[in-house]
Image (spheres, grey):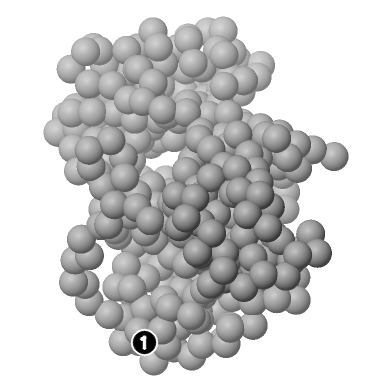
Amino acid sequence: MEEAIQIAYDENRRVYGQRKIKCLLLRRGLIVSRRKIGRIMKRRGLVSAYTRKKYRVHASKVNEAPVANLLDRKFGHRLPGACVVSDLTYVRVGAQWAYICILLDLGAREIIGYSAGAHKTAELVHSAFASVKGNLFEIQIFHTDRGSEFDNILIDEFLESFQIRRSLSMKGCPYDNAVAESTFKMIKAEGYDELDRYLDSRQYGIIDPTHVMTMDLGTVAGSANGKVVTTRHFYKEWVDSFIRCNSIPGKFVETAKAMLSLITVDVIVASVVDDSTIVACGYGALEAGCVGFYDIVVDPEYRKRGYGRALMEAIIAQARLQGAQRGYLQVRDSNEIARRLYLGLGFREEYAYWYRVKNR
């Protein structure tokens, strides 16, 4: 029995505790109590990874909104995409703490969206929704706990736009959002690198590797260009060109328009006009002394004319006038042309991320 427990512990990256080892042994036809497993683990010096440096929890306001718990702990038998649960938690990043927000599809049992940042805010939740690749109109229920970051007009307007019903846990009851809570516990306890290696060993392949890059705006000379037009708001012609240049499928057009309409921070909307037609476009989002560059795209028929660089330099020039000091963006690993452009402008990689899906 001791050897079976040792093997189970070693096979699972030396992170499993009594509960998980008991379940694993049961699947292998061995019935043993948690108490006995605990004694053997203690005698052999086997310590579960489900013990980490603790974060000092700060007091926060509670969402007192009179919203019912539509989920009612019915976590199973859900259609993929119909019900999404969410939560925010802290993670250790070097010597500091940061927050992550996840959107978990109960039916598919997978994370469909996420975001990370230095502050626990409604904008972090909105950014997680912005990362979802599916049709947001298919989501019927959005369930969370009563954290104050979910009690925000930005979130209310977003859910209303996509006709998503709100569901809230009972005050002070983490069991009502147990799937999100347990997912966070697994992420923290089992480690990111170890989890990635484990998924690789189980034939989960990498898709969409992406680089997050930043730069000091003082290192590049942003400049105006006669072909680039900048405004401080989105307008119909720009949105139509944005959809065309990005080749957004028809079924996602309304989702894209709704996401743009819900951006609440100041923006710099840029376009390149050639013969009265917008042939390249992109925008910058201004917040907290930074500018984020989004959807810098050129119509395929007008590429290799320097329009991408012209867009970037025009947005940089306007952002500096608005007091922005740093810029950030993300670019897929497969987009080598864009990566060379950003490196040439002075951007440097901060980190990379990717998704993993089961190989078919």
Name the side, left or right, on which 198 lies relative to 35: right
Name the side, left or right, on which 208 lies relative to 41: right
Which quadrant would the C terminus be assigned to in this image? top right
Vertical placement of residue 54 versus 314, above or below: below
Residue occupying image coordinates x 72% and y 49%: 250
Three-letter amino acid code at disc 1?
Lys
Image-quadrant location for residue 82: bottom right
Residue occupying image coordinates x 73% and y 40%: 202
Which quadrant would the N terminus be assigned to in this image? bottom right
- Neighbor class of circle 1 (other Cα within 10 Å; few <14, some 14-19, many 20+) is few
Q: Is residue 244 visible?
A: no
Helix, strand or loop at label 1? It is loop
Q: Nearer the viewer, residue 346 or 310?
A: 346
Q: Is residue 194 visible?
A: yes
Q: Nearer the viewer, residue 267 or 79?
A: 79
Q: Position of residue 283 (x, y in %)?
A: 40, 35
Vertical placement of residue 163 versus 264, above or below: below
Residue occupying image coordinates x 22% and y 65%: 57
Image-quadrant location for residue 71: bottom right
Residue occupying image coordinates x 45% and y 12%: 341
Residue matched to label 1: 171
Total numbered badges shown on the rendered structure = 1
Q: Position of residue 260 (x, y in %)?
A: 47, 51
Q: Position of residue 244 (x, y in %)?
A: 64, 36
Vertical placement of residue 136 versus 152, above or below: above
Q: Nearer the viewer, residue 203 or 347?
A: 203
Q: Position of residue 47 (x, y in %)?
A: 44, 52
Q: Residue furthest right?
A: 360
